[in-house]
Amino acid sequence: MISTLGKGVLILVGRCSMSDLSPRQQLILGLVIREYISSEIETEDGARRVQPVGSKVLVERYNLDLSPATIRNELARLEERGLLTHPHTSAGRIPTDAGYRYFVESLMGDEDLSPDEQRTIQHQFHQVRLDLDQWMRLASSVLARASGGAAIVTAPRAPQARFKHLQLISTQGRLVLFVLVLMDGSVKQEMLTLADPLSQADLDAVSATLNGLLSGRTAEEIRARRLDLSTLEADVLARVVDIMSRAD
DNA sequence: AGCGTGGGATGAGATGGTTG
DNA sequence: CAACCATCTCATCCCACGCT
């Protein structure tokens, strides 16, 4: 899910589970977050600062038909639920990550793109559907344009890298292109230098052996197994484990 | 003399707790 | 739910001091 908050603030959020707040708590949480975001100012030294939001500010600025004391009670409840916090005893409240998530998930509402924009984006993604790198670049570009802010896109990552497929491709002489595909869709490529030149058929045999032995396993599981391998297969396996360990 | 720095005093603003 | 009070922290001001 993608949402924007105020000028230049882009938040990428996942689903969060949170029991429902009372309508008044939802109102106050929403006001705190909007006020906090809009309070950003540039100081004389060029730094950007935001102000914690106090109960009095909320009552006065939004003409709430409640006393500051009542607002404080609700703010305290929102803080108990982890949606707000405050930097020190006498400071106003600031939203926590969970507060932002709840706001985006439950309070902002979704804004659909226009049919033209949807068609354009679908067409662009159709063009690059098989290339993960291009997909990521396009996704960040589309996000940045739609939100009017900076956008960062990362591929979903599994908690631990798992082996999916290995391909060894003969290039020239003893140089071999090593292509490792992980279960999360990421692709690792490196050049290997062999002790002696090998044919593509020999390399395919090594790939097939390791693909059969390693499919779906983590680096830790591979390390723990005792495998009867040739010197070359053992070398390639060591490289696989090394790359997967770095990917974790 | 002018400037920068550090420490103390004070006021503003916010909180939590208590009471009606 | 609102009002009041004690408490806390931050920002600001003022002053003393040291350096150039």
Image: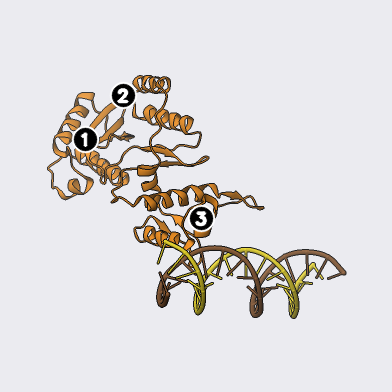
Chain colours: A orange, B brown, C yellow
- The residue indicated by pointer 1 is A164
Kind of residue sitting beneath label 1: Lys
Q: Which secondary structure lies at badge 3? A: helix
Q: Quadrant of the N terminus of chain A?
A: top left
Q: Is A199 positioned to the left or the right of A31 in the image?
A: left
Does A224 appear above or below A239? below
Q: Whole-Å distance between the Cαs marked 1 and 3?
A: 57 Å
Task: Name the disc covering residue A130, or none.
Answer: 2
The disc, 2 or 3, on the residue closer to the chain's N-terminal end is: 3
Q: In the figure, residue B18 lies in which quadrant?
A: bottom left
SS at badge 1? strand
What secondary structure is marked by label 2?
loop
Mark 2 crowdedness (10 Å alpha carbons): few <14, some 14-19, many ≥20: few
Instruction: Return the residue at label 3.
Output: A59
Q: Nearer the viewer, mark 1 or mark 3?
A: 3
Nearest to the eye among marks 2 and 3: give it.
Answer: 3
Measured from the top left, where is residue A21 in percent x and y? 33, 52
Residue in view at x 29 percent, y 32 percent: A179
Pointer 2 chain: A
**Which chain contains the residue that carries disc 3?**
A
